Image: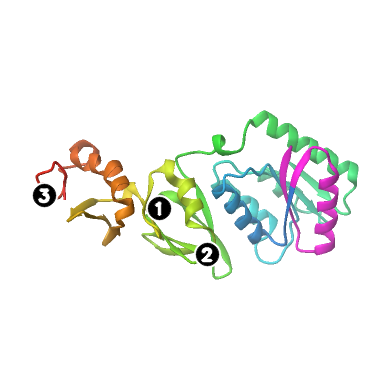
Amino acid sequence: MLHVLAVDDERPALEELTYLLRRDPRVGRVGCAGDASSALRDLSRMLVDGERLDAVFMDIRMPGLDGLDFTRLLTGFAAPPHVVFVTAHDDCAVTAFELGALDYLLKPVRPERLAESVRRVAGAVERAGPRGEDARDPEDEMIPVELGGRTRLVSRRAVTHVEAQGDYVRLHTADGGYLVRMPLSALTKRWEAAGFIRIHRSTLVASAHITEVRFDGGRAAVQIGDELLQVSRRHTREVRDRLVRKFHHPDAAGGEARGGDNGSGERR
């Protein structure tokens, strides 16, 4: 069964599109968004939660981020959903297909024409194979963030550490911090395989950006750039198990291990 997202800034059109999609027996789940920025946030949340999204049925002319810009941003995702445009304007078809759109429907939408689009999506998904957890590129991932009314994609590789701030997390990079609405617990699960380690109930760090690990009196801290981040007692063992070996082997650390020997074989 397909998982799709319907996007339109006009509520009657969105309700009609959602109704028609839900009537199709090949569609199992239909989400809704009133604009492209909301759709990007929904897509990011779904990826973090490990959910699948097969296709986006989207209008083109919308306030702020339009459908074409949304499709351009999708190129930053490892396994982007297919895009079907549903619009009252016929002057964007060439651009839409150049961007890789799977289909282009004109409003008012005829049920039989929408059914053909769903058939195309189903065929494309079947040919491509799974688009869920196993299909994602483990090397990188792009996270959409809002900046002054604009949407920017932040690479996971650029993130040095993450801090929980209420219902949000702040992604720290060399260029600054970006606030994203998502739980730290979900992001921890999502990025664990990419080398991110929970060092505190409110802090997640990228092991690739750690330059030093310190142990002192049973407490630990990790150095990331100019910041020294404390490791909670609860997470000290995990940090030791996953990181100390790196700093014991010069080849892995990229040079001589840092810190002194405390007599127990650990570097501090």
Q: Residues within 10 Å of mark 1 (few under 14, many from 20)?
A: some
Query: Of the residues under marks 3 and 2, which one precedes in the sequence?
Result: 2
Q: Residues within 10 Å of mark 3 (few under 14, many from 20)?
A: few
| Residue positioned 80% across, 64% down in the render | 10
The image's mark for residue 167 is 2
Which sits in the foreground, 43 or 90? 43
Gap in angstroms between the C-alphas marked 3 and 2: 40 Å
Query: Of the residues under marks 1 and 3, which one precedes in the sequence?
Result: 1
Please name the amino acid that badge 1 sits on: Ala
Please name the amino acid that badge 3 sits on: Gly
For numbered disc 2, what is the local secondary structure? loop
**With 133 as the anchor, is 94 left or right in this view?**
right
- Which segment did they paint magenta? 1-29
| Residue positioned 46% across, 44% down in the render | 140
- Residue underneath mark 3: 260
Q: Position of residue 267 (x, y in %)?
A: 16, 46
For numbered disc 3, what is the local secondary structure? loop
